[in-house]
Image: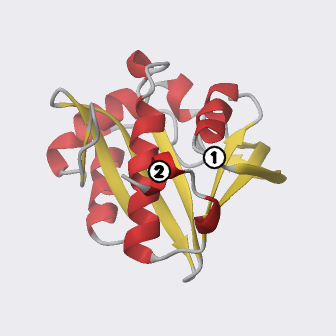
Amino acid sequence: MRTARLLLRTPVAADAARISLLAGDYEVASMTGTIPHPYSEQLAAEWIEGVHAGEEGEVFAILRSGALIGCVGYRAHGRTHAELGYWIGKPYWGMGYATEAARAVIAYAFERDGFDYLTVGHFNDNPASGRVIAKLGFARQGQEPRDRAAKGAKAVCFTYRLDRDSTPKSISTL
């Protein structure tokens, strides 16, 4: 899948070192629920194997000028909805890549899988992700405690929902 600046493709075994480097940065890992810290190349390789085995939902590596800069995807929760997730390597924060990649994946999820709605969340100490989620048109639903593998503790996660019928035209026309 291509966007104006990005290529989104399935992660491959050769991506393990780059994923380990970027996602393994504590400031990145600590903003996710599932990425541990430290995050070894071996763990990244095992995760990629899980992607190929269908254990991780739909996952895309995000490439900018041929270099992997993050990942985005979604995991179905039944037939009606899925949860969106993403991370961007710290050197690429604040450049709009998360928003651009997530827009493409949202359109893909609605068109390919026919979900009624998507959900997403961000931890209370990650307002930058909250801004991405707002740009994507998600509506705030509430909050709940969620695990944070890198911190080894639960934290408050703000939750959001985007209904297929209320998808902004900038997403649905991709």
- Label 2: how many Cα within 10 Å (few below 14, some 14–19, many 20+): some
Q: Secondary structure at mark 1?
A: loop
Question: Which residue: 59% across, 79% down?
Answer: 80
Which kind of residue does numbered mark 2 sit on?
Ile
Q: Give the quadrant of residue 39.
A: top left
Q: Which residue is mark 1?
A: 137
Q: Which residue is mark 2?
A: 171
Q: Marks 2 and 1: in contact by CB < 8 Å? A: yes
- Above or below — where is 109 with respect to 160? below
> In front here: 171 or 126?
171
The reply, left or right, for residue 31 in relation to residue 42 is: right
Q: Secondary structure at mark 2?
A: helix
Residue 68, position in %: x, y?
Answer: 25, 33
Whichever of callouts 1 and 2 sits on the residue coming sooner in the sequence is: 1
> In front here: 14 or 3?
3
- Above or below — where is 150 with respect to 96? below
Residue 20, position in %: x, y?
Answer: 34, 35
Q: CA distance from mark 1 to mark 2?
A: 9 Å
- Above or below — where is 84 with respect to 137? below
Residue 118, position in %: x, y?
Answer: 60, 63
Residue 61, position in %: x, y?
Answer: 29, 45
Rendering colour mode: secondary structure
- Label 1: how many Cα within 10 Å (few below 14, some 14–19, many 20+): some
